[in-house]
Amino acid sequence: MSVVKKVLGLLGSEISYTLSPLMHNTAAEALGLNYCYNVFDVHSPDDLPAAVEGIRALGIMGVNVTIPYKERVVKYLDSLSAEASEVQAVNTIVNQDGHLIGHNTDIYGFSEPLKAFMSELEKENIAILGSGGAARAAIQALKNEFKPASIFIVARNEAKSKSLKEDFKRRNKSLKLKTLNIADPEAIETMRDCKLIVNATPVGSAKPSARKEDLIPAEKLWTKNHIAYDLVYNPLQTPFLKGAKEAGAKTISGLEMLVYQGAKSFELWTGKQMPIELIRNTLLKALETTL
Ligand code: NAP
């Protein structure tokens, strides 16, 4: 094997906690592929255009994009896949001979772990906490593959959630999408009646600046009928999932989405299938030892 490795990486801010290098480097090594995945911490949004230009200038094969740049990065790319264009959020960039193509594998990553609950979700209400890039991917996935009655965007920034709603409504007139302010008591009432609640905020995550306590006190929110899906994967046991589990609800860890979105990105860069079981076990072990 050549000693010169093809470079992949992750663009984001405050991302020292990420498991993506472990995931992609383990997969590349297991398949004998000549890739190495690094962390590119872009501290200031002002540096994002230069960072993207650096992908081209340095011949980096591809990167993932994470919080807080998934939406902001769109305007610096040469083209977008149909899905990335629809949600206007990118989590994967492929460098094809200097042409930077934006993809969104979060949509696939979000859907895969939820498919086991497909029949339970049909014609049920769903709530999504947050109105950023992950919320966009979740709404797109729910629209594509599940048949919810209504989707509620529950977030703190009303202007942002309304603009998110309008973006989707423009393209999908029949989609029943509503917004609620997270501070509004009606939001809790509505969420108690939802079958699925998704946490698409960094609250509860290991990210140093993230709020650590629940957005909504567990005792006011969860019932045994709920399905709780936390997109946060580090720590494995978030306050959101702990509260849901204690109430008898079903839970899905963000680790599952991490594995599937990563597998899709890996395939886009290398053309190979990621060894899913090996990667899940490797990541679980890593998370369990940091608890
Ligand atoms: P983002 O675009 O920055 O959006 C974050 C959202 O969370 C925004 O709506 C933000 O509100 C809201 N928020 C942040 N702190 C909050 C707080 N204390 N109270 C209420 N709302 C708060 O980030 P993202 O890319 O959507 O990612 C969101 C989370 O999902 C991150 O933890 C990320 O790691 C995780 N994620 C996981 C996977 C996976 O594979 N498991 C994939 C994608 C994302 P404002 O707009 O008001 O700031």
Image (cartoon, rainbow, N blue to C red):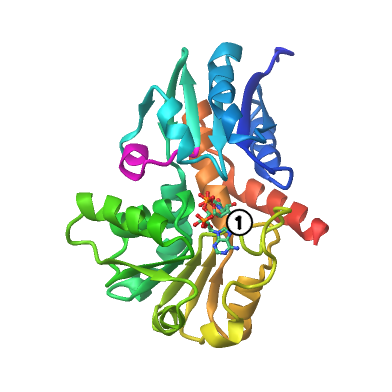
Which element carries disc 1, helix, strand or loop? helix
Q: Residue at x 74, y 13 (%)?
A: 3
Q: Would you place residue 232 above or below residue 49 in this image?
A: below
Q: Quadrant of the C terminus?
A: bottom right
Residue 50 location, x and y as percent? 57, 21
For mark 1, does the 10 Å Cα neighbourhood hold few (<14), some (14 to 19), or many (20 or more) residues? many
Q: Quadrant of the N terminus?
A: top right
Q: Is residue 280 left or right of residue 76?
A: right
Ligand 1 lies under 8 Å from the Cβ of mark 1: yes
Q: Nearer the viewer, residue 175 or 178?
A: 178
Q: Quadrant of residue 147?
A: bottom left
Q: Nearer the viewer, residue 168 or 237?
A: 168
Q: Residue at x 25, y 66 (%)?
A: 176
> Is residue 196 found inside the magenta-colored segment of the image?
no
Residue 229 in sight from this viewpoint: yes
Residue 271 in sight from this viewpoint: no
> Is residue 86 found inside the magenta-colored segment of the image?
yes
Query: Furthest-front residue in view?
Result: 159
Q: Would you place residue 12 above or below residue 241 in this image?
A: above
Residue 75 location, x and y as percent? 41, 29
According to the picture, the residue beneath numbered tag 1 turns out to be 255
In the rendered picture of this protein, how many numbered marks are placed on residues?
A: 1
Residue 36 location, x and y as percent? 68, 26
Q: Residue at x 27, y 72 (%)?
A: 149
Residue 113 location, x and y as percent? 48, 60
Residues rendered magenta in the picture? 83-91
Q: Quadrant of residue 115?
A: bottom left
Q: Quadrant of ligand 1?
A: bottom right
Q: Would you place residue 50 above or below residue 118 in this image?
A: above
Q: Would you place residue 239 above or below residue 115 in this image?
A: below
Amino acid under label 1?
Leu
